[in-house]
Amino acid sequence: MDHLTTVFQTKMGKEHQILRLFLNEDCHLRAIRLVPSILRLQRLLINKYQRKLDRAEATAFTVEQAQYDFIQDGKDDEVKLLIQNFAEAWNCVRQALENFPCPTSNGIAVVSKEFCSKQITDNSPISMLLPTIKDAGLCSYVLVYFLLKKQKSFLEKYCKVKRQKMTDLPKVKVHDLSPAHLISYHPERDILPIVLANCNYSFEVGKGTKIEYDFGNIERQLGDRFLFAKSDIDIDEIEVMTYRSDVTNAIVFRSLREKIPQVQLGAAVRHQICQELRSLPEICDCLDKLDITISFLKSVGENPTFRLDTFMTQTLKLTNPLVSPKSKAECQCQHVQCLWLTLAQEKTKWLAKHRKDVFDSLGEDYRKELTDQQRENLQYFCDGLQTDKVEVFMEFLFECIMLMIAIPQNTDDEDAYDILNQSLQRNLEGYLYSPLYDEEPLLPDWLTDTITRLDADTPDKLLVSQCVNVWLVLFESYRQKERERR
């Protein structure tokens, strides 16, 4: 094929435009045949892990471990082959993805150079294979988009050369794709035999072997077998993974409050509930069941004072949904937001304690590093607070992030604003005076003054884009004070 391309480029001028298009694009076109395998793998993985993993778990979970998960389904051999096909397609195009702008519902996204430099191996995180519109999952999402876009752009050029209309091609949606709709060929099994059947060898003394190609016949056979009557693909409907942390978020809670007014639990009740949950698996299990409960309550509503445990066990038929005796006794449907936030922060504390990724529902935009001066000023601010006040302030920041800051902005909306470069202190004040509960929450009097002091003690203004790292500093300060108190 390399020799054919070299000879063609040397000898041919403007002749055989279709063959020229094909040879120029072959390095990527050859991967299009793998799209059905990639889509099949994505569906299997999404069905297996949808809402069962969070982003941190998917980053730690390897491709090899995922293959073992499919043994009990009897699909391990199929999944292994599909992963090999994914890896082959990825290696074909990953360098081209570095600067490829892919439109998503969150705007234009580009796969990071870090991911584009990596091959898919057994040790790769499964998050690279689970399609999402941000982070590692962009690898899988953009891979499909790029290959389908490549077919579309190639067919537009092909139709122009053939003087055909692109609108005359059959149209198909992504979920209805089959190999018949695609420019689908194997470079060795399909293309090489055509090339070999259309080349002539001759030998001249003193000149050696001479190879001549019948470019016209090669072009004709390629067109008839692999390019004729292919489809124009609607690529706006690529299925994406929903992580557990994506299920319940600020927008969901807004819908919940429209159905059921939400009230905050007292600090002592929240503290006792956390004390009664002794392990991360218990916390995660309770959060999973609360996610299910919240999705129902935001849709159908319920009496605010109806017991939450009764609703979860009798209406939703969930088994032992609230492990904590205190939450069973105290929590009503009007407390579900507060209970979820309490458990979510407890989980976040556990992850931070073990140096795991936190706030996995937030993208990199909210993880901007603190400067050395900001970190020093923030530490000084924490040193001036008692242990219990650092804890309350940390919990308040967590709530503000989850209920207000984390609401995604629609960049196409003319009323959208850039929250990332706003003052974190101003956003905390905004949440202080309009907390997202339907009764005045039980906030201590000193909190207002403490929030006001935040920018005074940290003159190098803290931004919303730094909120994750601010929370981590507060958490480390709280842990240090706890150790000293003991």
Image (tube, helix red, strand yellow):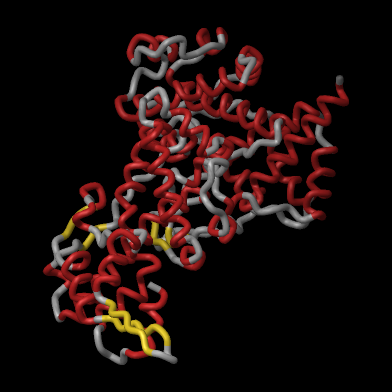
Give the residue displayed 15% in from the left and 81% down from the top: 163
Quadrant where the image shows the N terminus: bottom left
Asked whether residue 256 is in view, the answer is yes
Q: Nearer the viewer, residue 420 or 37?
A: 37
In which quadrant of the rendered view does residue 317 lie?
Answer: top left
Which percent across, then down, holds residue 84?
A: 43, 46
Which percent across, then down, holds residue 414?
A: 40, 63
In the image, 108: left or right of 149? Answer: right
Q: Which of 432 and 322 is in front in this view?
A: 322
Which percent across, then down, holds residue 246?
A: 46, 38
Residue extending farthest left:
168
Asked whether residue 402 is in view, the answer is no
In which quadrant of the rendered view does residue 253 lie?
Answer: top left
Which percent across, then down, holds residue 80?
A: 42, 39
- In the depicted structure, whether residue 293 falls above or below residue 452: above
Give the residue displayed 43% in from the left and 35% down from the top: 247
Give the residue displayed 21% in from the left and 67% down from the top: 227
Give the residue displayed 75% in from the left and 41% down from the top: 473
- Disc count in the image? 0
Quadrant where the image shows the C terminus: top right
- In the depicted structure, whether residue 376 falls above or below residue 294: below
- In the depicted structure, whether residue 14 falls above or below residue 420: below
Q: Nearer the viewer, residue 445 or 464?
A: 464
In the image, 10: left or right of 439? Answer: left
Q: Which of 23 and 194 is in front in this view?
A: 194
